[in-house]
Image: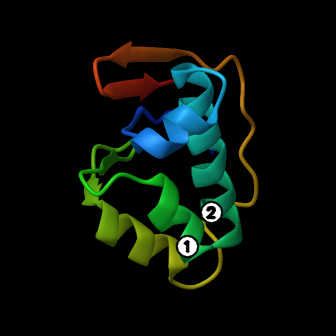
Amino acid sequence: MTRILTFLLAVTASALLAAAGPEDGVREAGAGWRQGAIKQDKALLEKYLADELVYTHGGGQTETKAQYIANVLKGPSHYQSMTEGDVRVRLYGKLAVLW
């Protein structure tokens, strides 16, 4: 089943500064989130997801960062793999939108 998710990702300043440009930092954070979700790695999810995260699923259900991480870590992995397509990044001041 294919899910269409809109994922708003606020990244820490250190992740943005570590990369060649802000967009690269956002892409790095997206990759870190995907790996954390697939591997059920709490440390990666804590690192790459903003404390203010509101995760919205394709069906409209929303979760806080803590709720999302708890659900990802519960039971067998929800994610087997995630394929990145033509990723776009839009910056709005300190907020980035990755889709």
Which image quadrant is residue 88 in?
Answer: top right
Quadrant position of residue 66:
bottom left
Side of 61 where 85 appears, left or right: right
Residue at 62 percent of width and 73 percent of height: 41
* Residue 86, visible in the rendered structure: yes
- Identify the image quadrant of residue 30: top right
Label ID, residue 36: 2
Q: CA distance from mark 2 to mark 1?
A: 8 Å
Q: Secondary structure at mark 2?
A: helix
Q: Is residue 51 above or below residue 95?
A: below
Q: Mark 2, residues whose alpha carbon is within 10 Å: few (<14), some, or many (≥20)?
A: many
Judged from the image, the secondary structure of the residue bearing numbered disc 1 is helix
In this rendering, the count of numbered labels is 2
Of the 4 image quadrants, the one containing the N terminus is top right
First in sequence: mark 2 vs mark 1? 2
Q: Amino acid at mark 1?
A: Ala
**At x 54% / y 75%, what residue is drawn?**
42
Q: Amino acid at mark 2?
A: Gly
x, y percent for residue 12: 41, 45
Q: Nearer the viewer, mark 2 or mark 1?
A: 1
Could you say which is closer to the camera, residue 29 or residue 83? 29
- Answer whether labels 2 and 1 touch (C-beta < 8 Å): yes
Q: Write down the residue under mark 1.
A: 43
